[in-house]
Amino acid sequence: MTKADTIFKDNIRRILDEGVFSEQARPKYKNGLVANSKYITGSFASYDLSQGEFPITTLRPIAIKSAIKEVLWIYQDQTNSLDVLEDKYQVHYWNDWEVAGTRTIGERYGAIVKRHDIMNKILKQLSENPWNRRNVISLWDYEAFEESPGLLPCAFQTMFDVRRVDGDIYLDATLTQRSNDMLVAHHINAMQYVALQMMVAKHFGWKVGKFFYFVNNLHIYDNQFEQAQELLAREPSDCQPKLILDVPDGTNFYDIRAEDFKLVDYDPVKPQLKFDLAI
């Protein structure tokens, strides 16, 4: 059992046993019913990537390549265009959140990165002084939200910090998420931001260090309780998955591609579970 499997099962139990039900929920299922959830607040996990701890469960297959492509769409292409996401990356699941008639998700995610030139500023700051304590990516932009409708960012803040240990520089990262659909998206979100951390580290020729993950509202939707029990009943695989970014140190952040990532020693439990998403 991996550390991620232990944390995953513990969180499922906590939500089912100690969680409370949402009220006045915003999302709906595709059949039009309100998507209520059971949730806990203030979930935190820490992974030492340098020691082989990666935030991915073996209890069900996780679509890592699609998750990484989404990160490239946001932080390299810096766009909210669904056409770019589909044509360039063949990723389609964001279509459910299209702002009608625009082929975008509104002024969100990549549009915010471009609007404030966030990635270039982060890379510049880290280049000029790796030990500065101001490496903050924030996608929470009230003015942009007022300009257009759209889903507000779930994973909305990332922070980077460095440590020198025995002559090596390690890049640590913290992901803060306001809300997380745990059974569907927890490990997708965590691993895609580990990928972002690895891209920044590789840009500078540093090692990846620790990954900290804070979720304010961690929930299971009320049509997922059967899947939650199935996950608790499953015995995890004895594999030890690791994400590898197979490019030379110093590779420019914007030159890294999804195919440069390899998930090794990953043999998750099957079959895959099915989920009706809350939109």
Image (tube, grey):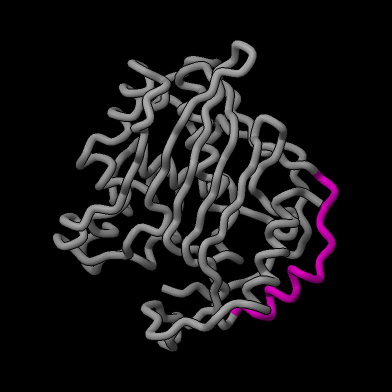
Residue 245: percent from left, percent from top? 59, 28
- The residue sitting at the top extreme is 167
Residue in front for this viewpoint, 73 or 101? 73
Q: Quadrant of the C terminus?
A: bottom left
Residue in front for this viewpoint, 139 or 263? 139
Residue 174: percent from left, percent from top? 49, 42
Write the start and end of the magenta stretch as one range.
224-239
Q: Total number of numbered labels? A: 0
Residue 179: percent from left, percent from top? 45, 64
Q: Is residue 29 left or right of residue 117?
A: right
Q: Is residue 254 left or right of residue 192?
A: left
Q: Is residue 70 left or right of residue 49?
A: left
* Image point (61%, 45%), residue name: 46
Q: Residue 261, located in which quarter of the rendered image?
A: top right
Q: Residue 38, located in which quarter of the rendered image?
A: bottom right
Report if residue 148 lies within the magenta region: no
Residue 36's place in the image compared with 136, above or below, is below
* Image point (67%, 69%), residue name: 12
* Image point (81%, 45%), residue name: 239
Residue 165's place in the image compared with 55, above or below, is above
Report if residue 227 lies within the magenta region: yes
